[in-house]
Amino acid sequence: MIEYKSAAFYRSVLALCVAAAAVFANLHLMQPLLPELSRQFQLSALTVSWVYTMGTLCLGLSLLVYAALSDAWGRKKLLLITLAGMTVSTLILSQVASFQALLFWRAVQGLFLGGLPAIAIAWMGEEYSKPALVSAVGLYISANSLGGISGRLLSGAMADLGHWQWVFYPMTLLGLLSCWLVWRYLPASLQFQRQPFRLKQALSDNLFHLRQPLLLLVYLIGGLNFLVFLNQYTYIAFVLAAAPFSLSSSLIGLLFVTYLTGTVGSALSAKIAARLSAPGAMAAGILIMMLGSVITLGQSLVLIGAGFFISAFGFFLCHSLASSWVSQHALRAKASASALYLVFYYLGASSGTLYLQPFWQAGQWLGVVIGSVLMYGLTLLLCLLLWRLKRQPSATAMPARQH
């Protein structure tokens, strides 16, 4: 086992965190560029948003495949393959000339981006001692967040400097660095036990999870919350790019700094849950997101920024608790249970523009806020149902089959 603060610990954490920053920077860098792409390709907000949605959609669909394949092929090997694929597709994106080509290569890139999220936590759980694991997971999640923020900031800055495709050059270099660091510093798995890939068993495990109300409700809460939260950023970008704000791509990218309050929400989640219970704390997070959404209706950049800071705190409070809930309540195949949560999470992200588009067409940003509050109201009801079911656990869980 790799011990906390050993040389192997620091080297492997560095490799995984740089890879995480590269993956999540690539995943999210398109979001501040959507108004610019809408102007360049003469497309509607809904149509152009598919450039961003395609990445999250393909990532989400790939997660269960990679989780199963890594059990059969090995963690490091598959991680290197997916990081290399990400890097090559990123370089190709710097050369595309049409919207159709951009969509296709974003889909290819999204499929490769799913490798790290599906594999990293499993590798850490096998190779690190418990003290090392706690620290490594915290650093890895921080790298996810910082990667998402930095990718958005960099893409906005590159668009203002010359051309939006320039962002893919530093992203390609970051991808190459992540490949080298993982190859050089991530140790070969010593605790890994190869398991033959059995499609029937994988499907059986996933169906089993979906039949557990205590899991299914949390899958829906996480996915539907992300459906709204992430895609509010997509539509507010069009608001900020238009009059009276008329902000540049780099300034729109700065809005994503609001994610930083999510770090605070995640850190405080356990303490809040200890006072309110996990379903109660999730509900509190949703109420905070409702409040933040309403505050963004103020006709000033200060209030819009404040609203998103508040929403980010509430979202990551709820998301952290939902992720932990799945690990604690899965009766078997915990890795696939967690992967299934991420599938719902990213499928939610991918469908948010479709849900919010009618509200946007009917009332612009006011319509988006109304649609957001309605969806948050639904997830709030799901939290209440979760709380009631948790009080009768013996009546809500189907027995795990012995195998």
Image (cartoon, rainbow, N blue to C red):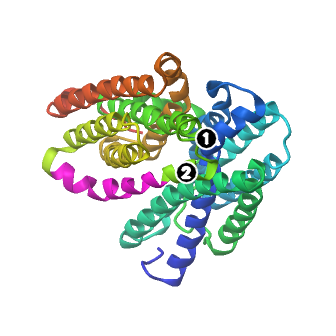
Picture residue at 14% right of the left edge, 33% below the top: 391
Q: Nearer the viewer, residue 361 or 97?
A: 361
Pick whichever of labels 1 and 2 is earlier in the sequence. Answer: 1
Q: Nearer the viewer, residue 200 or 329?
A: 329
Q: Nearer the viewer, residue 377 or 360?
A: 360
**Camera sees residue 201:** no
Residue 59, which numbered label? Answer: 1
Query: In the figure, is residue 263 to the left or right of 185?
Result: left
Residue 117, which numbered label? Answer: 2
Please provide percent x and percent y for residue 67. 56, 46
User: Magenta span has 321?
Assistant: no
Please provide percent x and percent y for residue 76. 64, 61
The C terminus: image quadrant: top left
Magenta residues (range): 257-274
Main secondary structure along the magenta-highlighted residues? helix
Q: Disc 1 marks which amino acid?
A: Leu
Picture residue at 70% right of the left edge, 64% below the top: 174
Please provide percent x and percent y for residue 114. 61, 46
